[in-house]
Image (cartoon, rainbow, N blue to C red):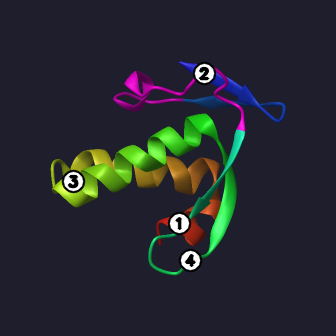
Amino acid sequence: MNITYNNTSYAIPKPFDQCYFGSNPTKELTITNQYSNASCKLPAFAVAIYDTIIGNDALQYDEGIANKGKYWFQKNFIDEYYILLD
């Protein structure tokens, strides 16, 4: 699955391609780091992946999913990764 946002195509890897991205996956939302209160804007599809990472971490469900999502952020939204996930 690929999504185009700001003239860039983003490949959405499994299992994140099963996330619900909303009716407008490129709509920008402001997300705040729960620990530092720093915030940034992300498209809805990236927010869905972020939420999956955070939920997975909270449940300690599958470290592989969290690592795959963090790697995706490092590759595609590096500044936002450092604000939200580092």
Mark pair 3, 4: CA separation: 24 Å
Q: Residue 70 appears in which quarter of the rendering?
A: bottom left
Disc 1 crowd rating (10 Å Cα; few below 14, some 14-19, many 20+) is many
The tag earlier along the polypeptide, 4 or 2, is: 2
x and y percentages locating residue 60 in the rendered image: 16, 57
Mark pair 4, 2: CA separation: 31 Å
- Whether the residues at callouts 3 and 1 have beta carbons within 8 Å, the answer is no
Q: Amino acid under label 3?
A: Glu
x and y percentages locating residue 65 in the rendered image: 28, 44
Q: Secondary structure at mark 1?
A: helix
Look at the image and give the residue range highlighted in magenta. Answer: 12-27
Of labels 4 and 1, the one closer to you: 4
The tag earlier along the polypeptide, 3 or 1, is: 3
Residue picked out by circle 4: 37
Mark pair 4, 1: CA separation: 9 Å
Q: Amino acid under label 4?
A: Asn
Q: Amino acid under label 2?
A: Asn
Residue at point 42% right, 28% down? 19
Residue picked out by circle 2: 2
Q: Residue 41 appears in which quarter of the rendering?
A: bottom right
The tag earlier along the polypeptide, 1 or 2, is: 2
Q: Amino acid under label 1?
A: Leu
Mark pair 3, 1: CA separation: 17 Å
Give the vertical position of 47 relative to 84 (above or below): above
Mark pair 2, 3: CA separation: 24 Å
Mark pair 1, 2: CA separation: 23 Å
Q: Is residue 18 magenta?
A: yes
x and y percentages locating residue 55 in the rendered image: 30, 51
Q: Residue furthest bottom?
A: 36
Residue picked out by circle 1: 84
Give the vertical position of 35 relative to 84 (above or below): below
